[in-house]
Amino acid sequence: MGNFLLGSYSARLDKSGRLKIPEKFRAAIEERYGKDLFVTSLSDDAVHIYPLPVWITLTGITQEGVNQFNQSVQSFQVRVSHMGSVNQIDLKGRVLISPQLRQKIQLDGEVEVLGINNHLQVWNKERLVKTIESKPLTTEDWEAIARLSPRGRNE
């Protein structure tokens, strides 16, 4: 259970755009995956920080040749590569977030770092609160989530 990235922590970007990864998240990432990370944005709402082995597993299907010619796969690769970079957790537990990503996501100073099972999301605090408030979970959302769970599929 210690390797899951769960919860939320406030953090701060330094003047160079480095994020000090909250200690519990950093320890879990390094213990299970090492220090290499892929930092990108998938949604333009948040920065997504994936341990590199997780990212490679998630996108590994694109290495099978024919998928390289799929327009959706190409568009995805262009988007995440344009916004993304491979980084490493430094000796002080920090990771650099590029100026391009910081500007796009409006990150400056205080941020919120969310653990989303196997990766992190870094949010502008105001944007996160507005997003949660403007898109509350509906009954239909809860039902869809229940159907995705192993228990929901068996019942």
Image: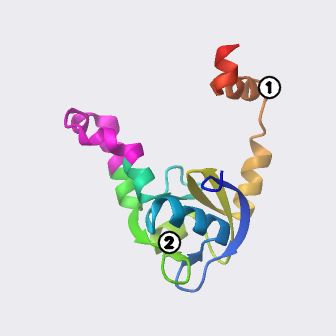
Quarter that holds the C terminus: top right
Residue 86 appears left or right of 133: left
Q: Is residue 103 magenta?
A: no
Q: Which mark is residue 139?
A: 1
**Mark 2 crowd level (few <14, some 14–19, many ≥20, 10 Å Cα):** many
Magenta-tinted stretch: 57-77
Main secondary structure type of the part rendered in magenta: helix
Q: Does the magenta stretch include residue 72?
A: yes
Which secondary structure, mark 2? loop
Q: Name the residue under label 2.
A: 97
In the picture as drawn, the residue positioned furthest to the bottom comes out as 15
| Residue 43 can be seen in this image | yes
Q: What residue type is labelled 1?
A: Thr
Q: Where is residue 71 in the image (x, y as percent from the top left)?
A: 29, 36
Residue 92 appears left or right of 2: left
Which secondary structure, mark 1? helix
| Residue 40 can be seen in this image | no
Q: Residue 130 carries which label?
A: none
